[in-house]
């Protein structure tokens, strides 16, 4: 062995551990092949893999990005005002955006605007909206919510009536994508026992259902009763019929708040998956999930899911403003607006207290396991931040709209954007949308200076880089007004292009799950271009098949064989033309172990609809039925133009020393610039698994 190393300029006597150190220090292509000649293959694979791991786990310093995502303002107009459009406090603005219209609901108001011009095309009271939808209610209607479902291309609205007495859930569905074409409304008894009344209704949807929840307060004379929550699940398909119906709606009633928490928020499920998860805050210290499971026509409610721990804070109960007037209520730590399911994760925001000020805590959790993926705090030393609402697009760009006020600032409307690189979201400075001009105190003799009770922020279904937020501000002394703002996001990379395929800018342009790192030294065959390559490890997080499918934008059951396995994944979406060729370099490091049936490594490619839902999916296994190891090349010719989601993943049994997957030089070559390459199914070491409209199960080595 000593004489062998003399041939490559090394006269040291080297044992196995020394070889690991030497390989770690000098690992490059030439040294790799020369060193391999000095050891038996089995021995070399063992020490070489150890060297790879030593390098792959070193932290790598990457040049800091010189530019961050910026948020610009498009349309920006005042919509409704106290004593003009409504005589109620608080206004509780809820809004959403469709293909051509912007819709705003407030307490005592309903408005529709043309999206391109901001022109008002419809206005009525909230009560009149429900009468026009065909409902009959008691007292007056309040606490409206509205969502737009880009998958069914329909609007859904909700509210409740008759505050303090026997009351009803009100639910309506639009006739078409156009909210002016008419709505069909329904009323459903909130409490068949007539002991409690529903307040603070919430609204969300997934692939199969529309979900409402409400806090249930004892009616007058029922003071001995405890607070509860009720949850209503309605099959979406029933609402989309030519003659909509709620005949199969299910009411889950008499849920103690010790089981469900208070003010449950269903998600706006932009993965279009079957995951009806409702979250509530647990005293600003965590989240309590409740899940509607089973067939939507006869579902069950699971309240036994474990609580999700977050960094503990105290609830923020009020916000400061200039002058001697009473502080404003902030709603405490409850989730005041819907959460968002995007890429297999649930995002939300709540108000908490930090250093005596109201601040916004945002979070991202895995939709399947409930594992906390990340959280952060948006705070200011001078001003209170409160009543935040969150929206997340397919690229995991985040926009939060909120109110801010302080001893030197009247209540104003703001927004802030966060850009996700890899698995980390970083926020920029807040952007002022509309400045408040005076102080505010309106109690109507009740002694409470109420504000809120919520705001709304959404992604434009026609453009994932456009967001809309519906906020409040003080437009004159003791007068609230709502502000509708279009926000244009300019990320620091072009999301329509495949970018940073060599990972020279870290994970800019990429989204990651699990243990995905950068390796700077030459590993295996070395980086195909530049200094870096990505390393995906099976020692990442537990990835359930449904959350991994959502992250990689794959159809349900595409990855059923990787249920509850440890692993990691990476993805990016881009536009491609017919004839374009996507290629990459990869290598599977088996650690010298025989890969068992629990290991899966694969490439996924999905063509997406305008709603970012997979319409065609192809899966390619990287676990060959061959015994040889080494660097590999993958290439595939795109058959149909469109937006594509490209992903790579590896999963395996729980092991700290499981296989790893190296990835580098991901390139999309235009047809005119591409040379003829073999199809993926003919490349050595690659098994083509599925083509067409449905993903196929991964074939694993047995």
Image: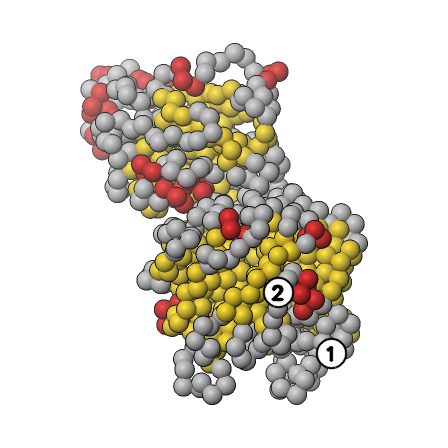
Name above or below for residue 555 compared with residue 48. Answer: below
Give the percent coordinates (x, y) of residue 558: 39, 35
Q: Quadrant of residue 261?
A: bottom left
Q: Looking at the image, is mark 2 or mark 1 earlier in the sequence?
A: 2
Relative vertical location of residue 198 with respect to residue 533 in this rendering, above or below: below
Work out which quarter of the rendered image holds the C terminus and state it. Answer: top left
- Residue 398 image offset from top left, x and y in percent: 57, 51
> With 214 as the anchor, is 320 left or right in this view?
right
Question: Which label is found at residue 274?
Answer: none
Give me the disc on residue 478: 1
**Disc 1 crowd, CA 10 A, few/some/many (<14, 14-19, 20+):** few
Camera-side residue of 408 and 605: 605
- Location of residue 666 in the rendering, given as x and y in whole percent from the top left corner: 49, 27
Image location of residue 307, percent across then percent down? 36, 63
Residue at image point 54% right, 70% down: 168
- Structural distance between the alpha carbons of marks 2 and 1: 34 Å
The N terminus: image quadrant: top left
Whether residue 354 is visible? no
The answer to whether residue 371 is above or below residue 436 is: above
Disc 2 element: loop
Which residue is depicted at the point 66% across and 83% down?
A: 443
Provide the residue designation for mark 2.
135
């Amino acid at each position: 062995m000593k004489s062998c190393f003399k041939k490559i300029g090394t006269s040291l006597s080297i044992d196995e551990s020394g070889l690991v150190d030497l390989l770690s220090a000098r690992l490059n292509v030439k040294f790799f092949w020369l060193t391999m000649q000095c050891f038996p293959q089995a021995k070399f694979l063992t020490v070489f893999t150890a060297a790879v791991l030593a390098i792959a786990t070193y932290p790598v310093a990457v040049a800091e990005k010189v530019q961050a995502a910026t948020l610009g303002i498009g349309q920006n107009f005042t919509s409704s005002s106290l004593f003009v459009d409504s005589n109620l406090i608080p206004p509780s603005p809820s809004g959403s955006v469709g293909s051509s219209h912007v819709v705003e609901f407030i307490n005592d108001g309903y408005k529709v605007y043309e999206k391109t011009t901001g022109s008002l095309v419809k206005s009525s009271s909230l009560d009149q909206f429900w009468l026009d939808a065909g409902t009959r209610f008691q007292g007056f209607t309040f606490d409206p919510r509205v969502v737009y479902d880009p998958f069914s291309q329909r609007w859904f609205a909700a509210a409740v009536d008759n505050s303090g007495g026997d009351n009803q859930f009100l639910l309506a569905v639009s006739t078409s994508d156009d909210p002016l074409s008419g709505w069909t409304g329904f009323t459903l008894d909130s409490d068949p026992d007539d002991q409690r009344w529903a307040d603070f209704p919430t609204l969300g949807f997934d692939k199969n259902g529309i979900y409402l929840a409400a806090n249930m307060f004892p009616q007058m004379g029922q003071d001995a009763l405890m607070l509860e929550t009720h949850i209503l699940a309605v099959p979406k398909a029933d609402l989309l019929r030519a003659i909509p119906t709620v005949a199969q709606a299910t009411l889950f009633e008499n849920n103690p708040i010790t089981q469900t928490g208070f003010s449950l928020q269903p998600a706006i499920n932009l993965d279009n998956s079957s995951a009806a998860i409702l979250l509530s805050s647990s005293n600003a210290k965590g989240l309590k999930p409740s899940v509607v499971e089973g067939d939507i026509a006869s579902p069950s409610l699971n309240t036994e899911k474990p609580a999700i721990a977050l960094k503990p804070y105290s609830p923020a109960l009020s916000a400061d403003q200039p002058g001697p007037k009473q502080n404003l209520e902030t709603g405490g730590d409850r989730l005041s607006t819907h959460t968002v399911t995007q890429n297999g994760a649930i995002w939300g925001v709540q108000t908490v207290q930090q250093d005596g000020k109201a601040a916004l805590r945002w979070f991202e959790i895995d939709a399947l396991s409930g594992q906390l993926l990340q959280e952060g705090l948006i705070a200011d030393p001078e001003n209170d931040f409160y009543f935040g609402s969150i929206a997340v697009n397919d690229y995991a760009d985040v926009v939060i709209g909120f109110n801010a006020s302080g001893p030197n600032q009247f209540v104003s409307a703001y927004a802030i954007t966060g850009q996700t690189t890899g698995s980390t979201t970083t926020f920029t400075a807040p952007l002022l949308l509309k400045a408040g001009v005076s102080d505010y105190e309106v109690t109507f003799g009740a002694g409470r200076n109420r504000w809120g009770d919520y705001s709304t922020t959404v992604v434009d279904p026609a453009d994932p880089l456009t967001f809309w937020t519906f906020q409040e501000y003080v437009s004159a002394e003791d007068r609230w007004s709502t502000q509708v703002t279009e926000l244009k996001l300019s990320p620091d990379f072009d999301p329509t292009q495949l970018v940073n395929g060599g990972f020279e800018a870290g994970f800019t342009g990429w989204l990651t799950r699990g243990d995905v790192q950068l390796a700077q030294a030459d590993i295996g065959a070395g980086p195909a271009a530049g200094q870096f390559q990505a390393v995906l490890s099976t020692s990442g997080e537990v990835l359930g098949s449904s959350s991994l499918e959502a992250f990689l934008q794959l159809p349900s059951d595409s990855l059923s064989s990787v249920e509850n396995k440890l692993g990691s994944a990476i993805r990016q979406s881009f536009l491609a033309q017919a004839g374009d060729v996507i290629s990459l370099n990869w290598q599977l490091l088996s650690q010298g172990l025989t890969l068992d049936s629990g290991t899966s490594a694969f490439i996924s490619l999905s063509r997406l609809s305008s709603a970012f839902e997979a319409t065609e999916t192809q899966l390619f296994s990287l676990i060959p039925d061959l015994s040889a190891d080494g660097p590999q090349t993958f290439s595939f010719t795109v058959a149909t133009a469109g937006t594509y989601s490209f992903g790579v993943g590896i999963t395996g049994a729980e092991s700290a020393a499981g296989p790893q997957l190296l990835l580098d030089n991901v390139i999309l070559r235009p047809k005119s610039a591409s040379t003829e390459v073999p199809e993926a199914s003919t490349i050595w070491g690659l098994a083509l698994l599925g083509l067409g409209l449905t993903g196929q199960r991964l074939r694993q080595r047995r």
